[in-house]
Amino acid sequence: MAAVKSKERFPYWETVKINWKANTVLSFAVSCIWLLLTPVLVGTANLDQQGAAVPLEMFVSLIGIILLTPVFLPEQNAEIHDLVASKYVSVLRIYLIRTVYLAVILAAAVGVFAVFMGMRGCEVNVKLAAGTFSDAIFLGGLGMFASAVCGNTVAAYMIPIGFYILNYGMGSRLGCFWLFSMTKGEYLSKIVLLAAGILLIGGSILLQKGRSIKGV
C-alpha cells in the first residue's frame, strides 16, 4: 500500500528543484543581468507614465523570452528525462509546473523593477506592470511555441526576437500586437497580447507533449 501511495504522489517539489538546477539558474541569472543593465541603457528616473513605459515595454519585457523559451530544454538533461519518462509521472503536468513556476518568477521580476522605478520618482502603476507582464508572456509564448514546433530551443529564440525587431519597423500598424502601445497611452491591446500569449503557451505544451509521447 505504501508503494502505491508513493507512486500516486506527484513529485512537485522534486520537479521544481531539478528544474531550478538544470535550467532556471542560468535563465534567471541572465534575466537579472539584463534588468541590472536596463537603467544603464535607458533612463529609469523621474519619468511620467508614458515615459516609464519605455524601459518596461522595450527592455524589461524581453525577460519573457529569456525565461520561457527554454521551458522544454530540460529534457536534454538525463535526470529530468528519466523523471518525465517514468510511467507514473504526467509529462503534461511537468510542463505545466515549469511554465507556472517561471511565470511566477517573471511576474515577480516585473513587479520588483516597477517598484524600483517608483522609488526613483517614476509614475508607475499596476497597469504599466500588468502591460509589461502581458508583453513578456506573449514574447515568451512565441518562443515556447517555436521551440515545440522546431524542437530546437536555440533556433526558437529567433522567432520572438524577430517579432520584437519587427515592432520597431511596423510600429502601431501591428494593431493590437504592437508591443509598445503603452508609450502612447494605450493599454487595452495588452489584454489581447496576454490572451494570445496564454494560447501560444497552451498550444506549445500540447505540441511538446505529443513530441515527447512519440519520442521525437
Image (cartoon, rainbow, N blue to C red):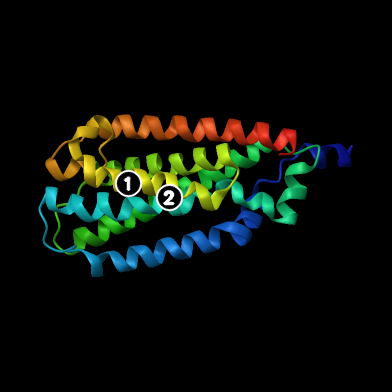
Task: Name the residue rendered at 24%, 33% in the picture.
Answer: 174
- In percent of width and height, residue 177 lies at 29, 34
Q: Mark 2 points at which residue?
A: 65
Q: What residue type is labelled 1?
A: Tyr
Packing grade of label 1 (10 A; few <14, some 14-19, many >=20) is some
Q: Does 14 sit left or right of 38 as displayed?
A: right
Q: Quadrant of residue 167?
A: top left
Which residue shows up at 33% across the image and 57% down it? 112
Give the distance between the C-alpha atoms of the residues marked 1 and 2, in whole angstroms.
10 Å
Q: Residue at x 22, y 39 (%)?
A: 170
Return the mark for residue 188: none
Front residue of 108/198: it is: 198
* Amino acid at pointer 2: Ile
For the C terminus, the image quarter is top right
Q: Is residue 178 shown left or right of residue 103?
A: left
29 lies above or below 65? below
Count the marks.
Answer: 2
- Closer to the chain start, of discs 1 and 2, is 2
In the image shown, does 80 or 151 lie closer to the viewer?
Answer: 151
Which element carries disc 1, helix, strand or loop?
helix
Q: Residues within 10 Å of mark 2 (few under 14, many from 20)?
A: many
Q: Residue 105 in the image: state x and y as whole percent.
A: 45, 52
Q: Where is residue 130 in the image (x, y as percent from the top left)?
A: 29, 42
User: Element under label 2?
Assistant: helix
- Residue at (40%, 45%) from the top-left corner? 160
Q: Which mark is residue 164?
A: 1
Q: In this view, does 188 lie above or below 52?
A: above
Which label sits in the foreground, 1 or 2?
1
Q: Label 2 near label 1: C-beta < 8 Å?
A: yes
Q: Quadrant of the N terminus?
A: top right
Whole-percent x, y for residue 197 in the image: 41, 35
When the figure is inspected, residue 98 is found, relative to residue 204, above or below; the finding is below
